[in-house]
Image (cartoon, rainbow, N blue to C red):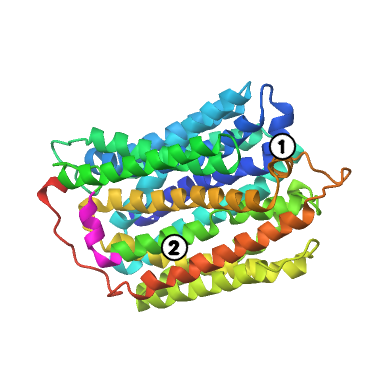
Amino acid sequence: MQYKWLVLSNTTVATLMSAIDSNIVLISLPTIGRELPGTNATLLLWILIGYSLLTSVVLVNFGRLSDLFGRVRLYVLGFAIFTFGSLLCGFAATGLELVIFRLVQAVGAGFLFSNSAAIITDAFPPNERGRALGVNQVSIVFGAVSGLVLGGIITSTIGWRWIFFVNVPIGLIATLRARTDLKELAKPPERPQIDWVGNILFAGGLTALLLGITLGALGQVSTTDAVVALLAGIAMLVVFLWVERREAHPMLDLSLFRIREFAASALAMLLNSLARGAFTFVLVFYLQGPPRFLSPFTAGLYLIPTSASLAVTGPISGWLSDRYGPRAFLVAGLVVSAAGFLWLSNIGPDDSFAQLAPPLVLVGAGMGLFASPNRAAMMTAVPPKRRGVASAIGSTLLNSGATISLGITLLVMSSVLPLSAIQAIFLGVANASQPFTAGAGFLTAIHLIFLISAGLLLVALIPSVLRGSTAPSPVVPAPEAGD
Protein backbone atom coordinates (compact mmCIF):
# COMPACT_ATOMS: atom_id res chain seq x y z
CA MET A 1 0.00 0.00 0.00
CA GLN A 2 1.27 3.47 -0.85
CA TYR A 3 2.38 5.47 2.16
CA LYS A 4 -0.22 8.18 1.62
CA TRP A 5 -3.06 5.65 1.98
CA LEU A 6 -1.56 4.29 5.18
CA VAL A 7 -1.56 7.85 6.49
CA LEU A 8 -5.16 8.47 5.46
CA SER A 9 -6.48 5.22 6.95
CA ASN A 10 -4.74 5.72 10.29
CA THR A 11 -5.60 9.40 10.71
CA THR A 12 -9.21 8.78 9.70
CA VAL A 13 -9.57 6.14 12.41
CA ALA A 14 -8.07 8.60 14.90
CA THR A 15 -10.34 11.51 14.04
CA LEU A 16 -13.37 9.22 13.85
CA MET A 17 -12.73 7.84 17.34
CA SER A 18 -12.14 11.22 18.94
CA ALA A 19 -15.15 12.73 17.13
CA ILE A 20 -17.43 9.88 18.18
CA ASP A 21 -16.37 10.39 21.79
CA SER A 22 -17.32 14.06 21.61
CA ASN A 23 -21.00 13.07 21.27
CA ILE A 24 -21.37 9.45 22.32
CA VAL A 25 -21.69 10.52 25.95
CA LEU A 26 -24.54 12.91 25.15
CA ILE A 27 -27.08 10.12 24.60
CA SER A 28 -25.89 8.29 27.72
CA LEU A 29 -25.93 11.22 30.18
CA PRO A 30 -29.29 10.43 31.84
CA THR A 31 -28.27 6.78 32.33
CA ILE A 32 -24.88 7.80 33.74
CA GLY A 33 -26.60 10.22 36.11
CA ARG A 34 -28.85 7.45 37.42
CA GLU A 35 -26.26 4.66 37.66
CA LEU A 36 -22.94 6.33 38.55
CA PRO A 37 -22.62 7.15 42.28
CA GLY A 38 -22.00 10.73 43.35
CA THR A 39 -23.14 12.29 40.08
CA ASN A 40 -25.12 15.54 40.09
CA ALA A 41 -26.18 18.04 37.43
CA THR A 42 -22.91 19.98 37.57
CA LEU A 43 -20.79 16.85 37.12
CA LEU A 44 -23.00 15.70 34.26
CA LEU A 45 -22.42 19.04 32.59
CA TRP A 46 -18.65 18.71 32.92
CA ILE A 47 -18.65 15.14 31.61
CA LEU A 48 -20.02 16.59 28.39
CA ILE A 49 -18.37 20.01 28.14
CA GLY A 50 -15.02 19.32 29.81
CA TYR A 51 -13.89 17.11 26.92
CA SER A 52 -14.67 19.72 24.27
CA LEU A 53 -13.31 22.57 26.36
CA LEU A 54 -9.92 21.03 27.12
CA THR A 55 -9.51 19.83 23.54
CA SER A 56 -10.10 23.40 22.34
CA VAL A 57 -7.56 24.77 24.82
CA VAL A 58 -4.69 22.43 23.96
CA LEU A 59 -4.99 22.18 20.17
CA VAL A 60 -2.85 25.15 19.12
CA ASN A 61 -0.33 24.37 21.85
CA PHE A 62 -0.02 20.79 20.66
CA GLY A 63 0.19 21.88 17.03
CA ARG A 64 3.14 24.09 17.83
CA LEU A 65 4.80 21.37 19.91
CA SER A 66 4.34 18.97 17.01
CA ASP A 67 6.05 21.38 14.64
CA LEU A 68 8.95 21.45 17.09
CA PHE A 69 9.25 17.81 18.20
CA GLY A 70 7.71 15.88 15.31
CA ARG A 71 4.10 15.43 14.22
CA VAL A 72 4.11 11.65 14.00
CA ARG A 73 5.81 11.24 17.38
CA LEU A 74 3.20 13.30 19.23
CA TYR A 75 0.38 11.85 17.12
CA VAL A 76 1.32 8.35 18.30
CA LEU A 77 1.55 9.63 21.87
CA GLY A 78 -1.94 11.10 21.51
CA PHE A 79 -3.38 7.78 20.34
CA ALA A 80 -1.88 6.03 23.36
CA ILE A 81 -3.18 8.67 25.81
CA PHE A 82 -6.67 8.61 24.27
CA THR A 83 -6.84 4.82 24.51
CA PHE A 84 -5.65 4.84 28.13
CA GLY A 85 -8.16 7.58 28.99
CA SER A 86 -10.97 5.49 27.45
CA LEU A 87 -10.02 2.56 29.65
CA LEU A 88 -10.04 4.77 32.75
CA CYS A 89 -13.47 6.20 31.84
CA GLY A 90 -14.93 2.72 31.61
CA PHE A 91 -13.76 1.93 35.16
CA ALA A 92 -14.81 5.27 36.71
CA ALA A 93 -16.38 4.71 40.13
CA THR A 94 -17.82 8.22 40.70
CA GLY A 95 -19.01 11.17 38.66
CA LEU A 96 -15.92 13.19 39.58
CA GLU A 97 -13.62 10.40 38.43
CA LEU A 98 -15.40 10.26 35.07
CA VAL A 99 -14.96 14.02 34.62
CA ILE A 100 -11.22 13.70 35.31
CA PHE A 101 -10.76 10.68 33.05
CA ARG A 102 -12.64 12.44 30.23
CA LEU A 103 -10.02 15.19 30.49
CA VAL A 104 -7.32 12.56 29.99
CA GLN A 105 -9.16 11.50 26.85
CA ALA A 106 -9.29 15.13 25.73
CA VAL A 107 -5.50 15.47 25.97
CA GLY A 108 -5.08 12.50 23.64
CA ALA A 109 -7.75 13.85 21.29
CA GLY A 110 -5.89 17.16 21.22
CA PHE A 111 -2.76 15.48 19.86
CA LEU A 112 -4.81 13.56 17.29
CA PHE A 113 -6.85 16.52 16.04
CA SER A 114 -3.89 18.90 15.92
CA ASN A 115 -1.73 16.60 13.80
CA SER A 116 -3.95 14.56 11.53
CA ALA A 117 -4.55 17.23 8.86
CA ALA A 118 -0.86 18.24 8.87
CA ILE A 119 0.30 14.63 8.46
CA ILE A 120 -2.15 14.14 5.58
CA THR A 121 -1.04 17.38 3.92
CA ASP A 122 2.60 16.28 4.15
CA ALA A 123 1.82 12.88 2.59
CA PHE A 124 -0.45 13.90 -0.31
CA PRO A 125 0.43 16.07 -3.33
CA PRO A 126 -1.51 19.34 -3.71
CA ASN A 127 -3.85 17.96 -6.39
CA GLU A 128 -5.04 15.15 -4.07
CA ARG A 129 -5.22 16.93 -0.72
CA GLY A 130 -8.84 18.02 -1.07
CA ARG A 131 -10.04 14.45 -1.53
CA ALA A 132 -7.85 13.11 1.30
CA LEU A 133 -8.80 15.86 3.72
CA GLY A 134 -12.41 15.41 2.61
CA VAL A 135 -12.41 11.83 3.85
CA ASN A 136 -10.74 12.92 7.08
CA GLN A 137 -13.06 15.87 7.67
CA VAL A 138 -16.15 13.79 6.93
CA SER A 139 -15.01 11.36 9.64
CA ILE A 140 -15.07 14.22 12.17
CA VAL A 141 -18.64 15.31 11.53
CA PHE A 142 -19.84 11.78 10.74
CA GLY A 143 -18.31 10.57 13.99
CA ALA A 144 -20.01 13.33 15.95
CA VAL A 145 -23.40 12.29 14.54
CA SER A 146 -22.90 8.52 14.51
CA GLY A 147 -21.71 8.71 18.11
CA LEU A 148 -25.30 9.46 19.05
CA VAL A 149 -26.54 6.30 17.31
CA LEU A 150 -23.78 4.11 18.74
CA GLY A 151 -24.26 5.58 22.20
CA GLY A 152 -27.96 4.78 22.11
CA ILE A 153 -27.38 1.20 20.97
CA ILE A 154 -24.56 0.45 23.40
CA THR A 155 -26.18 2.09 26.42
CA SER A 156 -29.50 0.31 25.89
CA THR A 157 -27.91 -3.13 25.35
CA ILE A 158 -24.63 -3.73 27.20
CA GLY A 159 -24.38 -0.62 29.40
CA TRP A 160 -22.89 2.88 29.28
CA ARG A 161 -19.38 1.81 30.35
CA TRP A 162 -18.93 0.09 27.00
CA ILE A 163 -19.13 3.37 25.13
CA PHE A 164 -15.58 3.80 26.45
CA PHE A 165 -14.37 0.19 26.47
CA VAL A 166 -14.98 -0.24 22.72
CA ASN A 167 -12.22 2.32 22.08
CA VAL A 168 -9.55 0.22 23.77
CA PRO A 169 -8.89 -2.60 21.26
CA ILE A 170 -9.26 -0.24 18.29
CA GLY A 171 -6.96 2.30 19.93
CA LEU A 172 -4.29 -0.28 20.77
CA ILE A 173 -4.15 -1.58 17.21
CA ALA A 174 -4.17 1.92 15.69
CA THR A 175 -1.43 3.10 18.08
CA LEU A 176 0.85 0.21 17.12
CA ARG A 177 0.14 0.72 13.41
CA ALA A 178 0.84 4.45 13.66
CA ARG A 179 4.12 3.74 15.46
CA THR A 180 5.12 1.23 12.79
CA ASP A 181 3.79 2.73 9.55
CA LEU A 182 4.00 6.51 9.86
CA LYS A 183 7.18 8.52 9.41
CA GLU A 184 8.27 12.11 9.82
CA LEU A 185 8.28 14.00 6.51
CA ALA A 186 8.86 17.46 8.03
CA LYS A 187 12.16 17.83 9.85
CA PRO A 188 11.78 19.52 13.28
CA PRO A 189 14.15 22.35 14.20
CA GLU A 190 17.35 21.34 15.96
CA ARG A 191 16.76 23.70 18.90
CA PRO A 192 13.05 23.85 19.67
CA GLN A 193 11.87 26.82 21.73
CA ILE A 194 8.59 26.74 23.64
CA ASP A 195 6.54 29.87 24.27
CA TRP A 196 5.37 29.08 27.82
CA VAL A 197 3.89 32.53 28.44
CA GLY A 198 1.83 32.30 25.26
CA ASN A 199 0.66 28.78 26.16
CA ILE A 200 -0.54 29.87 29.59
CA LEU A 201 -2.28 33.02 28.34
CA PHE A 202 -4.06 31.22 25.51
CA ALA A 203 -5.17 28.28 27.65
CA GLY A 204 -6.31 30.52 30.50
CA GLY A 205 -8.10 33.00 28.25
CA LEU A 206 -10.00 30.41 26.22
CA THR A 207 -10.91 28.44 29.32
CA ALA A 208 -12.28 31.49 31.12
CA LEU A 209 -14.19 32.60 28.03
CA LEU A 210 -15.86 29.24 27.47
CA LEU A 211 -16.54 28.75 31.19
CA GLY A 212 -18.28 32.12 31.34
CA ILE A 213 -20.49 31.30 28.37
CA THR A 214 -21.45 27.72 29.24
CA LEU A 215 -21.76 27.88 33.03
CA GLY A 216 -23.44 31.27 32.93
CA ALA A 217 -26.04 30.08 30.43
CA LEU A 218 -26.87 27.01 32.54
CA GLY A 219 -27.08 28.98 35.75
CA GLN A 220 -24.18 27.09 37.32
CA VAL A 221 -22.65 30.41 38.40
CA SER A 222 -24.11 33.85 39.03
CA THR A 223 -24.45 36.40 36.26
CA THR A 224 -21.73 38.50 37.88
CA ASP A 225 -19.30 35.58 37.99
CA ALA A 226 -20.08 34.70 34.38
CA VAL A 227 -19.42 38.28 33.22
CA VAL A 228 -16.18 38.40 35.23
CA ALA A 229 -15.05 35.13 33.61
CA LEU A 230 -15.89 36.44 30.15
CA LEU A 231 -14.02 39.71 30.69
CA ALA A 232 -11.04 37.89 32.19
CA GLY A 233 -10.94 35.53 29.22
CA ILE A 234 -11.11 38.35 26.69
CA ALA A 235 -8.40 40.30 28.55
CA MET A 236 -6.06 37.29 28.62
CA LEU A 237 -6.56 36.63 24.91
CA VAL A 238 -5.83 40.28 24.09
CA VAL A 239 -2.63 40.10 26.14
CA PHE A 240 -1.83 36.82 24.41
CA LEU A 241 -1.99 38.49 20.97
CA TRP A 242 0.20 41.35 22.23
CA VAL A 243 2.78 38.89 23.58
CA GLU A 244 2.78 36.77 20.42
CA ARG A 245 3.58 39.78 18.24
CA ARG A 246 6.75 40.34 20.27
CA GLU A 247 7.77 36.78 21.11
CA ALA A 248 10.91 35.50 19.37
CA HIS A 249 9.51 31.96 19.14
CA PRO A 250 5.71 32.38 19.29
CA MET A 251 3.34 29.53 20.00
CA LEU A 252 0.88 30.92 17.47
CA ASP A 253 2.36 32.17 14.22
CA LEU A 254 0.20 35.23 13.60
CA SER A 255 1.93 35.75 10.25
CA LEU A 256 -0.29 32.95 8.90
CA PHE A 257 -3.26 35.30 9.07
CA ARG A 258 -1.52 37.61 6.62
CA ILE A 259 -2.17 34.92 4.01
CA ARG A 260 -5.55 35.86 2.62
CA GLU A 261 -6.62 32.33 1.72
CA PHE A 262 -5.75 31.05 5.19
CA ALA A 263 -7.47 33.90 7.01
CA ALA A 264 -10.65 33.59 4.91
CA SER A 265 -10.77 29.82 5.42
CA ALA A 266 -10.26 30.22 9.17
CA LEU A 267 -13.08 32.77 9.51
CA ALA A 268 -15.48 30.72 7.40
CA MET A 269 -14.64 27.62 9.44
CA LEU A 270 -15.35 29.42 12.72
CA LEU A 271 -18.70 30.75 11.52
CA ASN A 272 -19.67 27.33 10.17
CA SER A 273 -18.78 25.71 13.49
CA LEU A 274 -20.76 28.32 15.44
CA ALA A 275 -23.77 27.57 13.22
CA ARG A 276 -23.73 23.79 13.43
CA GLY A 277 -21.90 23.12 16.71
CA ALA A 278 -25.06 22.60 18.77
CA PHE A 279 -27.06 21.03 15.92
CA THR A 280 -27.01 17.45 17.25
CA PHE A 281 -27.39 18.64 20.85
CA VAL A 282 -30.62 20.47 19.99
CA LEU A 283 -32.03 17.63 17.90
CA VAL A 284 -31.27 15.01 20.54
CA PHE A 285 -33.31 16.87 23.14
CA TYR A 286 -36.02 17.72 20.60
CA LEU A 287 -36.39 14.01 19.87
CA GLN A 288 -35.93 12.66 23.41
CA GLY A 289 -37.49 15.56 25.28
CA PRO A 290 -41.04 16.92 25.40
CA PRO A 291 -43.33 16.18 23.74
CA ARG A 292 -41.81 13.26 21.75
CA PHE A 293 -39.88 11.24 24.38
CA LEU A 294 -38.30 8.89 21.86
CA SER A 295 -35.80 6.27 23.03
CA PRO A 296 -32.05 6.97 22.59
CA PHE A 297 -31.86 4.35 19.84
CA THR A 298 -34.84 5.74 17.90
CA ALA A 299 -33.56 9.31 18.28
CA GLY A 300 -30.23 8.21 16.82
CA LEU A 301 -31.95 6.67 13.81
CA TYR A 302 -33.62 10.01 13.06
CA LEU A 303 -30.16 11.53 12.60
CA ILE A 304 -28.98 9.03 9.96
CA PRO A 305 -29.99 11.27 6.99
CA THR A 306 -27.52 13.93 8.15
CA SER A 307 -24.56 11.58 8.46
CA ALA A 308 -25.42 9.66 5.28
CA SER A 309 -25.64 12.78 3.10
CA LEU A 310 -22.46 14.16 4.62
CA ALA A 311 -20.59 10.91 3.99
CA VAL A 312 -21.61 11.02 0.31
CA THR A 313 -20.94 14.69 -0.47
CA GLY A 314 -17.74 15.15 1.55
CA PRO A 315 -15.31 13.02 -0.48
CA ILE A 316 -16.93 14.02 -3.78
CA SER A 317 -16.63 17.70 -2.93
CA GLY A 318 -12.99 17.27 -1.94
CA TRP A 319 -12.16 15.44 -5.16
CA LEU A 320 -13.92 17.98 -7.39
CA SER A 321 -12.40 20.95 -5.55
CA ASP A 322 -8.93 19.55 -6.31
CA ARG A 323 -9.78 19.92 -10.01
CA TYR A 324 -11.92 23.06 -10.15
CA GLY A 325 -10.99 25.03 -7.03
CA PRO A 326 -12.88 25.31 -3.72
CA ARG A 327 -14.92 28.53 -4.04
CA ALA A 328 -18.02 27.15 -5.80
CA PHE A 329 -18.25 24.21 -3.39
CA LEU A 330 -17.83 26.42 -0.33
CA VAL A 331 -20.63 28.73 -1.45
CA ALA A 332 -22.89 25.80 -2.40
CA GLY A 333 -22.27 24.06 0.92
CA LEU A 334 -23.10 27.13 3.00
CA VAL A 335 -26.26 27.90 0.99
CA VAL A 336 -27.50 24.29 1.13
CA SER A 337 -26.91 24.03 4.89
CA ALA A 338 -28.57 27.40 5.49
CA ALA A 339 -31.62 26.21 3.54
CA GLY A 340 -31.75 23.10 5.74
CA PHE A 341 -31.61 25.15 8.93
CA LEU A 342 -34.32 27.51 7.67
CA TRP A 343 -36.50 24.47 6.98
CA LEU A 344 -35.81 23.11 10.48
CA SER A 345 -36.81 26.45 12.02
CA ASN A 346 -40.41 25.49 11.21
CA ILE A 347 -40.50 21.94 12.56
CA GLY A 348 -43.52 20.90 14.59
CA PRO A 349 -43.86 19.04 17.88
CA ASP A 350 -44.49 15.64 16.25
CA ASP A 351 -42.96 15.72 12.76
CA SER A 352 -42.44 12.26 11.29
CA PHE A 353 -39.18 10.83 10.01
CA ALA A 354 -40.30 11.54 6.44
CA GLN A 355 -40.92 15.19 7.33
CA LEU A 356 -37.57 15.65 9.09
CA ALA A 357 -35.39 13.75 6.62
CA PRO A 358 -35.28 16.37 3.78
CA PRO A 359 -33.96 19.29 5.90
CA LEU A 360 -31.55 16.94 7.69
CA VAL A 361 -30.21 15.79 4.30
CA LEU A 362 -29.69 19.43 3.28
CA VAL A 363 -27.79 20.23 6.47
CA GLY A 364 -25.55 17.16 6.11
CA ALA A 365 -24.95 17.66 2.39
CA GLY A 366 -24.01 21.29 2.97
CA MET A 367 -21.55 20.28 5.70
CA GLY A 368 -19.94 17.79 3.35
CA LEU A 369 -19.69 20.26 0.47
CA PHE A 370 -18.03 22.88 2.68
CA ALA A 371 -15.70 21.05 5.06
CA SER A 372 -13.08 19.37 2.89
CA PRO A 373 -12.49 22.15 0.29
CA ASN A 374 -12.22 24.73 3.05
CA ARG A 375 -9.71 22.71 5.07
CA ALA A 376 -7.71 21.82 1.95
CA ALA A 377 -7.50 25.48 0.93
CA MET A 378 -6.46 26.42 4.46
CA MET A 379 -3.69 23.83 4.67
CA THR A 380 -2.36 24.34 1.13
CA ALA A 381 -2.05 28.09 1.70
CA VAL A 382 0.59 27.80 4.45
CA PRO A 383 4.30 26.91 4.28
CA PRO A 384 5.05 23.23 5.04
CA LYS A 385 6.91 24.00 8.27
CA ARG A 386 3.79 25.63 9.71
CA ARG A 387 1.22 23.02 8.80
CA GLY A 388 1.20 21.60 12.32
CA VAL A 389 0.13 24.87 13.90
CA ALA A 390 -2.16 25.61 10.93
CA SER A 391 -3.90 22.27 11.41
CA ALA A 392 -4.22 22.96 15.12
CA ILE A 393 -5.68 26.42 14.49
CA GLY A 394 -8.33 24.88 12.25
CA SER A 395 -9.23 22.21 14.78
CA THR A 396 -9.26 24.79 17.58
CA LEU A 397 -11.73 26.91 15.64
CA LEU A 398 -13.94 23.86 15.08
CA ASN A 399 -13.94 22.83 18.74
CA SER A 400 -14.16 26.34 20.16
CA GLY A 401 -16.96 27.24 17.77
CA ALA A 402 -18.89 24.11 18.73
CA THR A 403 -18.50 24.83 22.44
CA ILE A 404 -19.52 28.48 22.05
CA SER A 405 -22.43 27.31 19.88
CA LEU A 406 -23.63 25.25 22.82
CA GLY A 407 -23.39 28.35 24.98
CA ILE A 408 -25.44 30.36 22.47
CA THR A 409 -28.03 27.58 22.44
CA LEU A 410 -28.32 27.58 26.21
CA LEU A 411 -28.56 31.38 26.28
CA VAL A 412 -31.48 31.23 23.82
CA MET A 413 -33.19 28.52 25.85
CA SER A 414 -32.73 30.44 29.09
CA SER A 415 -34.32 33.52 27.51
CA VAL A 416 -37.44 31.51 26.61
CA LEU A 417 -37.66 28.79 29.27
CA PRO A 418 -37.30 28.83 33.06
CA LEU A 419 -34.06 27.31 34.33
CA SER A 420 -35.95 24.50 36.06
CA ALA A 421 -37.41 23.42 32.70
CA ILE A 422 -33.97 23.45 31.03
CA GLN A 423 -32.51 21.31 33.81
CA ALA A 424 -35.47 18.91 33.61
CA ILE A 425 -34.86 18.42 29.89
CA PHE A 426 -31.09 18.15 30.21
CA LEU A 427 -31.17 15.64 33.08
CA GLY A 428 -34.01 13.59 31.59
CA VAL A 429 -36.35 14.42 34.49
CA ALA A 430 -39.14 15.38 32.10
CA ASN A 431 -40.82 12.26 30.73
CA ALA A 432 -43.98 11.12 29.04
CA SER A 433 -45.70 10.23 32.32
CA GLN A 434 -45.24 13.74 33.74
CA PRO A 435 -46.89 16.69 31.91
CA PHE A 436 -44.34 19.27 30.76
CA THR A 437 -45.94 22.70 30.67
CA ALA A 438 -43.03 24.45 28.89
CA GLY A 439 -43.28 22.35 25.70
CA ALA A 440 -44.38 25.24 23.46
CA GLY A 441 -41.57 27.45 24.74
CA PHE A 442 -39.06 24.69 24.15
CA LEU A 443 -40.12 24.44 20.50
CA THR A 444 -39.95 28.23 20.13
CA ALA A 445 -36.36 28.16 21.42
CA ILE A 446 -35.45 25.45 18.91
CA HIS A 447 -36.89 27.51 16.05
CA LEU A 448 -34.88 30.55 17.11
CA ILE A 449 -31.66 28.53 17.45
CA PHE A 450 -31.97 27.17 13.90
CA LEU A 451 -32.71 30.64 12.53
CA ILE A 452 -29.48 31.91 14.15
CA SER A 453 -27.61 28.98 12.60
CA ALA A 454 -28.91 29.84 9.14
CA GLY A 455 -27.88 33.48 9.61
CA LEU A 456 -24.34 32.54 10.66
CA LEU A 457 -23.94 30.34 7.58
CA LEU A 458 -25.05 33.16 5.30
CA VAL A 459 -22.53 35.50 6.96
CA ALA A 460 -19.84 32.87 6.28
CA LEU A 461 -20.49 33.42 2.56
CA ILE A 462 -18.62 36.74 2.78
CA PRO A 463 -15.10 35.36 3.49
CA SER A 464 -15.80 32.36 1.25
CA VAL A 465 -16.51 34.58 -1.75
CA LEU A 466 -13.80 37.16 -1.01
CA ARG A 467 -11.02 34.70 -0.22
CA GLY A 468 -8.91 35.59 -3.26
CA SER A 469 -7.24 33.05 -5.51
CA THR A 470 -8.60 29.52 -5.36
CA ALA A 471 -5.38 28.04 -6.71
CA PRO A 472 -2.92 26.46 -4.28
CA SER A 473 -0.96 29.28 -2.69
CA PRO A 474 2.81 29.44 -3.03
CA VAL A 475 4.95 29.06 0.02
CA VAL A 476 4.93 32.37 1.85
CA PRO A 477 8.10 33.17 3.74
CA ALA A 478 7.53 33.69 7.44
CA PRO A 479 9.60 35.51 10.02
CA GLU A 480 12.74 33.77 11.22
CA ALA A 481 11.33 33.60 14.74
CA GLY A 482 8.38 31.42 13.73
CA ASP A 483 10.56 28.60 12.39
Q: Left or right? Give the position of 252 relative to 4.
A: left
Q: Residue at x 49, y 32 (%)?
A: 103
**Dot placed on the residue nearer the N-terminal end, 1 or 2:** 1
Going by the numbered disc 1, the residue's amino acid type is: Pro
Q: Do we see residue 110 in this rendering?
A: no
Q: Do we see residue 335 in this rendering?
A: yes
Q: Looking at the image, which is closer to me, 255 or 472?
A: 255
Q: Is residue 61 above or below residue 356?
A: above
Disc 1: which residue: 30
Q: Is residue 317 above or below residue 41?
A: below
Disc 2: which residue: 134
Front tag of 1 and 2: 1
Q: Left or right? Give the position of 321 relative to 290.
A: left
Q: Left or right? Give the position of 254 relative to 227.
A: left
User: Which region of the structure is painted magenta?
Assistant: 253-261
Q: Looking at the image, which is closer to me, 370 or 458?
A: 458
